[in-house]
Amino acid sequence: MKASRPVFDALAHPDTLKKVINGGSQNSNESFHAVLWSLAPKNRYTTGVVIDLCAAIAVLSYNEGDQSILPVIAELTGGGCGFYTKVAMRRLDERRVYSELKRKQAEERTKLTKQT
């Protein structure tokens, strides 16, 4: 009990808890992990090759956006990507950028209201 008390106190500190309010996370990799496990869910068995492929696609998607996956799809299928696949990837990227912009604007508004 004595050994776990300092850890509990650190995790229960108000400054720490403010970071995780409204579904936030202290773990910067959590968003990447969400992308990875959406491609290869933990509750289904997949081979190491599939996990490696999903990890590579997740890294591309997370770092460069969904349109960066198009060359991988073209290579795997032996041809090009379809028109609607390209449109879907572009829309996903646009939605991701728009959502991030709205999130940042909301954070700025919150900071401004706290200052006044």
Image (spheres, rainbow, N blue to C red):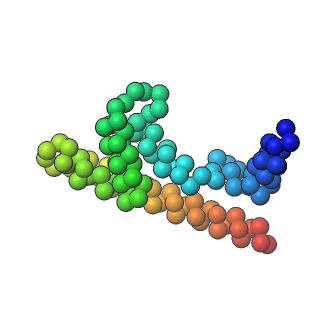
The residue under the point 30% across, 52% down is 69
Task: Estimate the x, y position of residue 78 in percent, counting from the top left.
Answer: 13, 44
Location of the N terminus (image quadrant): top right
Count of numbered circles in the view: 0
In this rendering, would 13 be left or right of 107?
right
Q: Quadrant of residue 106?
A: bottom right
Residue furthest to the left in view is 79
In this rendering, would 58 be left or right of 14?
left
Residue furthest to the right in view is 2
Closest to the observer, 14 or 88: 14
Task: Estimate the x, y position of residue 47 in percent, counting from the top left.
Answer: 34, 32
In this rendering, would 45 be left or right of 110?
left
In this rendering, would 92 be left or right of 87?
right
Location of the C terminus (image quadrant): bottom right
The residue under the point 47% across, 27% down is 43
Task: Estimate the x, y position of residue 49 in percent, counting from the top left.
Answer: 31, 37
As drawn, 77 above or below 18: above
Q: Is residue 48 visible?
A: yes
Q: Is residue 91 visible?
A: no
The residue under the point 70% across, 50% down is 21
Closest to the observer, 15 or 48: 48
Task: Estimate the x, y position of residue 59 in percent, counting from the top left.
Answer: 39, 52
Closest to the observer, 70 or 32: 32
